[in-house]
Each structure stands twice: as structure tokens, then as C-alpha cells.
Image (cartoon, rainbow, N blue to C red):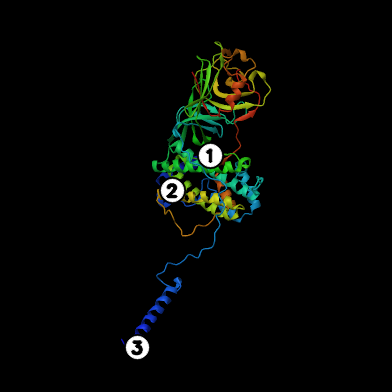
Amino acid sequence: MTRRGLLRIGLVVSLATAVFVVLLLRPAAHNPRAPSEPNLPNLSAGPQPAFAVGRPQLLQRATAASRWATVGRPVTALRAPGGRPVTRLAAVTPEGTTNLVDVLGSVWHRGVEWVHVRLPLLPNNTTGWVPRSALGGYHFVTTHLVVSLHRLRATLWKDGRVVFSAPVGVGQPQSPTPRGEFYIRDELTGYASPFYGPVAFGTSARSAVLTEWPDGGFVGIHGTDEPGWIPGRVSHGCIRLRNRDILRLARLLPVGTPLTIT
Amino acid sequence: MRDDQEAATHRGDTTGPDDLVQTLAEIDVDGALRETADAAVRATRRDLLRAIPLAGAVSAGLLTARGAQAAPGLTKNDVAILRFDLALEYLQAGLYTEAERLGAVKPRTLAFSRVVGAHERAHARAIKGFLGSKALPSPSFDYRGVTENDTAFVKTAVAFEDLTAALLKWQAPRLDSRSIVAAVLTLHSVETRHAAWIRHIVGVLPAATAFDQPAPQHEMAALIASTKFVVSGWTTIRRRKPRFTG
């Protein structure tokens, strides 16, 4: 090979090497095929949420709850929607609290919704119908108080479980505690009467014997100043509990709770 | 008034999806809602603070700015906003829970109520727990037949979910604490999902606009007060000597 030929080969190799080096050192940003580098600001982790929402809990036995409503205005309760009158339902109880009724169901009759309610009326266990418009909003309880006149014991159920049980004093033979389905109407506190103990609950039950009793002879559930008489058939129809038991019950028993006396 | 409302609600059974309202202002529970909304826009905040208590909202805690005391580590502003949110969560949780318990709405709506009710109860528990002693108890509600009629119920649900999302959007930039903003945003996205879900159920467009507008808190308070869903003035507990048979 001549000297001239060697120079040509050297020149070609040098040019090829130079091109290779240039391409190799070329910035990646200028290469459309090269992956682009992110140009993000340096973000901080950010604040943690001040509170977290816990696991949602579906209602258990949604339809098993009992329903009650306040009486929004005085209204005549009827035997059936559009039927004959049963009684006049007051908006206020004899104790001065807002009157309420247990709700058993409802129907539409001639364009008006009628609500089937339990009434605080003699004879006990009377029910009637009132227009929905006479009642306030619905409230729900999952409690149920059962008083056994045979076992002389009160048992409170909540969500299908027993949460309270205690011995009781009930009516004497001449003034018996009425049997049937009732409800808790109100709660009285802050009075000074050892006879009734520290707390008293009003119910929709009424004595069938003491009809001339002040305020209508309603049956209450209350404490006592004679704890030694409990359990027993000692009262005028009311359901008496020892004071420590009525205080415990007061923490568990909401108004509107159905009351079964059996 | 309720008889008229009930009759109107009853007639609403034949209403089709096209007639469904989009906002709470269109529910018009007592015929005064639209007027109240218009008035709310014009009214000063002081006027609203004077007007809303008449609807019983004070006891409900819907008036949050007044009487709110700053909890440790929380500004008065943030407590006020969270109290308002708690009252709204109470209101929604009560609505869905009552609908589920009564079981009077259609099965598809009932399934929505069951899930969303659980969400709203969880929201209320979370906010109440966070506020601690600054939390207000739940007021009493009277949903005026809405939970007993499918058409009326879905109208209300659409309105509440849309507006709750809009309200949280308005509140977020007004919160002082960024960590509370972060927490509220976890609720906001869920409320928008609820809104889309109930809109899908009733056959209206789940995402109607490209941008959502915020809803000011004072307008929301006036609208809620005008529904008269929040009730007060009754009691079942009294300090008085019994006169039972004994």
C-alpha cells in the first residue's frame, strides 16, 4: 500500500472516530429518542390528615327498631283512618313533658297518611290512628323493657341482647300492675321525694283500679325508700326498683322504649 | 301544612327523572325555600345570624360561628367550620338511617341509603371525635315525609350530596389548618361519589359540568333552616316530682 493510501485510511478512521465521539458526548436532552429526565420541584411530604374516618358500620337489624314520634299538636285519635273517635291526644303529658306515641305502622287513606299508634288510654292496650301531620319526626330505639309480674324482674334488651336485669316490686293484688304492651313516655329527675327514689320513668300504662288518682293514675317505673320490700307485690301499680338499679337503668333506657308487662 | 305537603309528595310519585331537582333550593319543602335562598344571597351575615335561630337552627348547632370556642390546637375558625360540617353530617346520617329503617323507598334507593348512611354516620363519628368537648350533640330531625316517599327522598339526596360537596369545596381554602384540609378532602371525594351515585340512580347526568362551583356556608345554613328538617322545642325529661300511682 502506498503512503497516500495509508493517509486516506487514517483520515477515514479519524473522521469516523470523531463522529462517534461527538455522538457519544451529545447531551441526551437533544436526542429525541433518549428518555427525558423529570424536572419536578422537591415536594414535601405534606400534612397528615387531622382525623381519619373509621370503618363504616351498617345498621344491624335495621327494621327491628321501634319507632316513636312526638305529638306535635292536640289531635283526635280515631279507631281507623277516617273512622270514629277514640280519644283526644294531648300535646303535653300530665308531667309537663312533650307527649309521644309508639308508632305501629302507617297507611295512606284518601290522600292523607295515617299513623297507627299505641295510646296512653284505658282500657290499656288501646290503639288508634292519627294523621301523620299531627306528629313530629320519627325516632328509633333498639331497646325493649320486659317486666315479668310472675318472676318479679325487669329485663332490658338492646339490639337483641340483655343489658340489664333487676328485681322489682309490683302492684298488690288490690291494685295490680296492668299487663300488656306499653311504652316509656318520659323521665323525671331532680325532685326531692324519697318515696319515688332518684329517678322516675312515666309509662303509657294506667291503673285500671286507681282511676281517680291525680293525673290519671299512670304507672311509673321508679326508685324506692323501702328497698327491703323488693322483690315483692307491694305497690299501687307502679314498678319499683332499688335506687342503685333505677340509676343503672336510667343510663340505658331511652324514652320511647317499648314496655311489655307480662 | 303537612297535609298539603303530603298530598304534593304523594302526587310526586308520578314524577319522572327529568323533573328531578338538582339543588336543595328546588326541593321547596314548605314553599318558602326559594325565597329564603334568594334572601340569603342578599342578606348580610348579621341578618342571617338573626334569622336562622327562628328556624331552630341555633340548638342544632347549625350556627357555628357564634359561640364556638377554639379547642386546644384549633383555631376558632376551624372549630366553627367543623361544627357546621358535623351538623350537616348528623342531618344526612339521620336522613339515610331513617329511610333504611322505614324501608319505604325503592330497593335500589334503599341499597344506596344503607351504604351512604353508614358513610355519613362514620363521618359524623370522626368529626365528633376530633372536636371532642367542642362537638355539639345531634339535634332532632323531622324529615317531613321525605323518607317515606321514593321520589321526594331521591330529590333530597341529590340536593344534599351535591351541596355537601360544594360546601366542602368552599370551606377547604378557608380552613386555617392544612392537616384539617387534608382530612376534609378525604370526605369531599366520598361526597362527590355519593352525588354521582344517586344521580345515576335517578337517571340524571352524574357529572353535569366540567367545573363545580363552591357553595358558601351561610347560604347552606339558610337553606337547611328553611327545610325545617331541624326541630327543637320539645322535651321528654323534666325536673319534677312524679304523681304516678306509686
Label 2, residues with CA under 10 Å away: few <14, some 14-19, many ≥20: many
Q: Which mark is residue B198?
A: 2
Q: Position of residue A23 (x, y in %)?
A: 41, 75
Residue closest to the far left: A1
* Separation of residues labelled 3 and 1 (CA atoms): 109 Å
Kindly report which numbered mark, 3 or 2, lies closer to the viewer in this rendering.
Answer: 3
Residue type, label 3: Arg
Does B76 sit above or below residue A27? Answer: above
Q: Are both tags, 3 and 1, on one chain?
A: no
Query: In this orientation, which residue lies closer to the viewer: B226 or A113?
Result: B226
Label 1: element kind: loop
User: Which quadrant does the N terminus of chain A fall into?
Assistant: bottom left
Residue closest to the far right: A192
Query: In this orientation, which residue lies closer to the viewer: A219 or A114?
Result: A219
Label 3, residues with CA under 10 Å away: few <14, some 14-19, many ≥20: few
Q: Which mark is residue A3?
A: 3
